[in-house]
Image (cartoon, grey):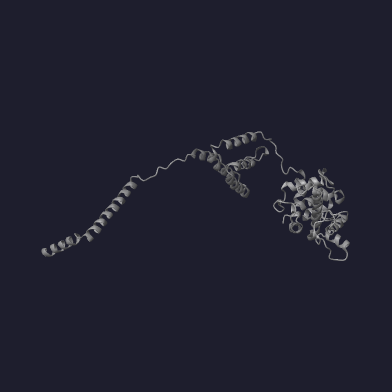
């Protein structure tokens, strides 16, 4: 029995002594021992909390704390004395735009989308952390803050244009929006900016949107519709019949100073043999105001061409274009310094000129969402 055990041990030792067995086995045993030691060491270190990371304090920690304390969940932008301080954010964004335009754009986009004053303020301060050593930026902010405390205590409530604060104006905007497709269609055919067309519509309609008028009480106000004139002037834009006739003639006369070109000749062609009746009928159509806008747009483009040929372009003068629309061809005499005016319109007993009303609407931003500004007022297709 002992001889057999000895023989087995001898055999194992003999096999282990061979290099191809000894080295791999030894390497395996050493590797296993190392792994075991590492795991044991890790276990002990975890028990003794030797692996805990103490962390580091961010250099802007104090700044973060100040923002947290100032803009906690209960913070609200103050409106003391009727003064809305949301413009502080906008001014800060304008300053940031000089030094970090990309970040300023992102902040402005977020502001315009959500109108969240507190979050906007936090976004601004997040960027300002990296502008702490920028003296130019800090000086601009400092100067702004000085001026901030010198602002008047009272601010104008509503629009600066007083006639836009009447309730009838809200009715007009609803009524006007209903004709957006018609106005867009006319603009596409004539190349006249929609907003410019609407500027002339405003001047004509606002005097009719009067709560004292019986017509306003009966259907204009309740139904939120535009007034269609049918006596001295025609349609929603108040085109006089003789003016309409002249507009049509100028489209067909290549020798006219108002001639627009061959592509516009057929814009106002008639479908019947009775142009007089058809002209009036399409302008006073209560359900479809298309031709009211078409005649207005063509007139605007014709006087624009007239003044351009005379060397006095008025493309950038909506108030002059509207004035000429109101006074008609006889008063359209190109010159260096044209005057703004036209009919005097009383709105709650306060006088306004037709041209001034058109100008104020055009640059007011009202109805911008449906009648935006184009890069060019004419031929923008």
160 or 244, which is in the foreground? 244
Q: Residue at x 13, y 62 (%)?
A: 6
Side (left or right) of 348 relative to 58:
right
Side (left or right) of 17 relative to 187:
left
- Quarter of the image for residue 349 reads top right
Numbered label tally: 0
Placement of 230 over or under 348, stated as above or below: below
7 or 188, which is in the foreground? 188
Q: Pick the quarter of the image with the C terminus.
A: bottom right
Q: Residue furthest bottom?
A: 272
Placement of 63 over or under 323, stated as above or below: above
Q: Position of residue 111 (x, y in %)?
A: 61, 47
Q: Position of residue 378 (x, y in %)?
A: 75, 53
- Please say whether residue 226 is visible from this viewpoint: no
Q: Position of residue 106 (x, y in %)?
A: 59, 48
Q: Pick the quarter of the image with the N terminus.
A: bottom left
Q: Position of residue 136 (x, y in %)?
A: 58, 36
- Please say whether residue 177 is visible from this viewpoint: yes
- Quarter of the image for residue 186 reads bottom right
């Amino acid at each position: 029995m002992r001889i057999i055990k000895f023989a087995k041990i001898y055999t194992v030792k003999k096999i282990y002594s061979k290099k191809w067995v000894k080295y791999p086995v030894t390497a395996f045993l050493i590797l296993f021992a190392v792994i075991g030691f590492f795991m044991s060491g890790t276990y002990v270190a975890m028990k003794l909390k030797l692996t805990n990371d103490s962390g580091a304090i961010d250099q802007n920690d104090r700044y973060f704390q100040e923002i947290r304390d100032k803009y906690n969940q209960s913070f609200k932008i103050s409106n003391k004395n009727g003064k809305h301080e949301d413009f502080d954010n906008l001014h800060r964004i304008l300053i940031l735009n000089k030094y970090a335009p990309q970040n300023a754009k992102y902040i402005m986009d977020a502001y315009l989308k959500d109108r969240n004053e507190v979050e906007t303020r936090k976004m601004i301060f997040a960027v300002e952390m990296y502008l702490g050593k920028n003296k130019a930026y800090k000086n601009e902010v400092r100067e702004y803050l000085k001026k901030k405390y010198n602002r008047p205590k009272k601010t104008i409530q509503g629009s600066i244009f007083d006639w836009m604060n009447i309730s009838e104006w809200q009715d007009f905007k609803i009524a006007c929006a209903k004709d957006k497709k018609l106005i867009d269609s006319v603009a596409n055919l004539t190349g006249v900016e929609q907003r410019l067309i609407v500027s002339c519509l405003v001047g004509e309609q606002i005097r009719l949107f009067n709560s004292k008028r019986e017509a306003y009480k009966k259907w204009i106000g309740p139904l939120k519709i535009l007034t269609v004139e049918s006596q001295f002037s025609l349609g929603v834009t108040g085109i006089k019949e003789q003016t309409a006739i002249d507009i049509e003639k100028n489209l067909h006369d290549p020798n006219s100073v108002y001639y627009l070109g061959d592509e516009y000749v057929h814009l106002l062609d008639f479908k019947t043999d009775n142009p007089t009746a058809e002209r009036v009928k399409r302008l006073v159509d209560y359900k479809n105001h298309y031709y009211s806008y078409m005649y207005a747009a063509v007139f605007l483009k014709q006087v624009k061409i007239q003044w351009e040929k005379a060397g006095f372009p008025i493309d950038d003068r909506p108030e002059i274009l509207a004035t000429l629309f109101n006074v008609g061809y006889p008063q359209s005499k190109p010159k260096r310094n044209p005057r703004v005016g036209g009919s005097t319109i009383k709105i709650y007993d306060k006088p306004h000129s037709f041209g001034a009303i058109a100008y104020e609407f055009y640059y007011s931003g009202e109805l911008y969402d449906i009648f935006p500004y184009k890069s060019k007022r004419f031929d923008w297709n």
